[in-house]
Amino acid sequence: MEHIKTIVKSGVQRFTLMFMITLLFASNSFAQKPKLIVGIVVDQMRVDYLTRYESKFGEGGFKKLMKGGYFNKNANFNYVPTYTGPGHASIFTGSVPRINGIIANDWYDKKTGKSIYCTQDETVNTLGSDSKAGKMSPRNMLTTTIGDELRLATNMQAKVIGISQKDRASILPAGHTANAAYWYDGTNGAFITSTFYMKQLPTWVDDFNAKKLAEKYLAQDWITLLPLASYTESLADDNAYEGLFKGETKPVFPHKLPELKEKNKGLNMIRATPYGNSLTKDFAIEAIKNEQLGADAITDFFSVSFSSTDYVGHQYGINAIETEDTYLRLDKDLEELINYLEKNIGKENVLIFLTADHGGAHNAAYLQDLKIPAGFVNEKMIEDSMKAHLKQMFGDTLVMSYSNQQFFLNHKTLSKNKLKLKEITMEAARYALQLEGVSNAYSVYDIVAASQSNDVALSRIYMGFNDVRSGDIVLNYLPAYVDYAKTGTTHGAAYTYDTHVPLLWYGWKINQGASYEPINISDIAPTIASFLDISFPNGCVGKPIGGLVK
């Protein structure tokens, strides 16, 4: 009898012990998920900026992420065009334009015959200003984001918020179910949103806007952070490859912002200065604090995109002192943001990743002066020439639009004249190869057959080609050939200068290290989904990245 009691008692103890262990493991598993994920996108950031400017970075910004975290050094976009809208959509959906539908910032709408903007939505209204800048939503994006999946997995308890100066850079990352997305309106210097998300702005946003920080930032001249002579990583301050603010005669420091503001779109001018990033950082910290992101056991998601780097890059190019100074100042903004996160939420509770939506090309005129093959294309000439050629060949006007290096044909006219689409597109592609600056030309038939192509340009065009929204013929320009001014720079190409971007991971359980293994930017979202044990976004084509966590 005593033996039986001992067995029963032992069994109860074992059951109790196993139950406690199960609870412990469950608790640890839950606790080991980050409380907050922060996705940082730096607009138009080339990966080589990290090493080019490294000696002048402080220890708490880019260097902290590089040295204290994990650096994927061979991260690329696997589609074209490499623009802001598609870039942000791809990062956070784990998808590509072929599936998520964000094929460009703007594209020709076959149904209406008009251009459509990637986040425009006439069914919603602006909150925070009297302008139409808030008539925006994510409705044109066809897939979920990692934030959407997090909201679904937590029965909508997780908070998901996106912010940026650019509407598309806050809306597309946040997704369809986000608690909020906020962006900057230069008409009144305020961060605004749309009625897609809420009925009125939170009090904290009104309070932030009431500080009129944009006006205060623009009340100072833009001078270099360091002595001008120390910017040896850049070209001379006065050179022929940089653009000007209206009212300036030379692209040199100091830039007298108070004097130039009214000639340069008023409070919108802050976008083309490093102070636009500082304003975004200020708003980001207020959002984290007032929305209590990362304050409970349910993981929250916060995206912040720094856009001034793109505006500065477009105006001055990738070799300008202005560009370098913008990154040195952004480094300090990142340090302040990271310090806030570590102090108030804890490094072990925050997962940070930093990447870019695209890179940027060398100024084509600069390359030409160095005898490197480069040049300029005239897209109006390309469109007019194609229109004239097809009309001469087939007796009617067949081209409706040329945008994003795509020709859209008039299918009603083709049907009326009993013309075969394949014949027209093949002829158009053949003719396009004769035009200045064109490297490749593909018909829709080439593209839809290209899913397994070894042609890198064609493969990237395929991933960026949406059968419903894209055109009938797609051109690829030669390396370093651009449709742009002779000053500053642009982006959008299938080449590494636009596809190769940084990818840094930091905090939570992230290892210290680096890898040169090739990955696609669409791998970010499924990696995060794997960390959280939730579903991948529903249009995801990426795969989780190995080696990141302990």
Image: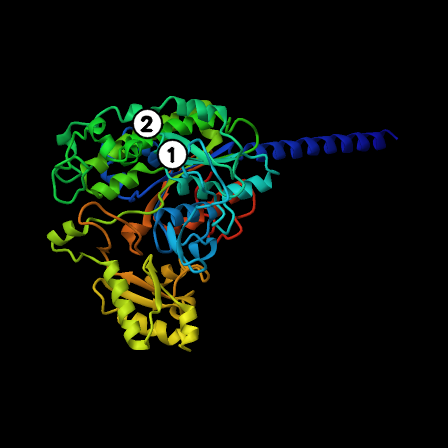
Amino acid of disc 2: Ala
Does residue 166 sit above or below 230 in this rendering? Answer: below
Residue 514 falls left or right of residue 468: left
Of residues 445 and 186, the one nearer the viewer is: 186
Of residues 108 and 301, the one nearer the viewer is: 108
Tell me which corner region of the image, top left, top right, bottom left or bottom right, holds residue 8: top right
Q: Mark 2 near mark 1, Cβ–Cβ under 8 Å? A: yes
Residue 238 falls left or right of residue 326: left
Name the residue beneath numbered marker 2: 214
Does residue 468 sit above or below 497 in this rendering? Answer: below
Of residues 236 and 466, the one nearer the viewer is: 466
**Residue at horizontal 37 percent and vertical 36 percent from the top:** 165
Amino acid of disc 1: Tyr
Q: What's the CA distance linking mark 2 and mark 1?
A: 10 Å
Name the residue beneath numbered marker 1: 184
SS for callout 1:
strand
Q: Which mark is residue 77?
A: none
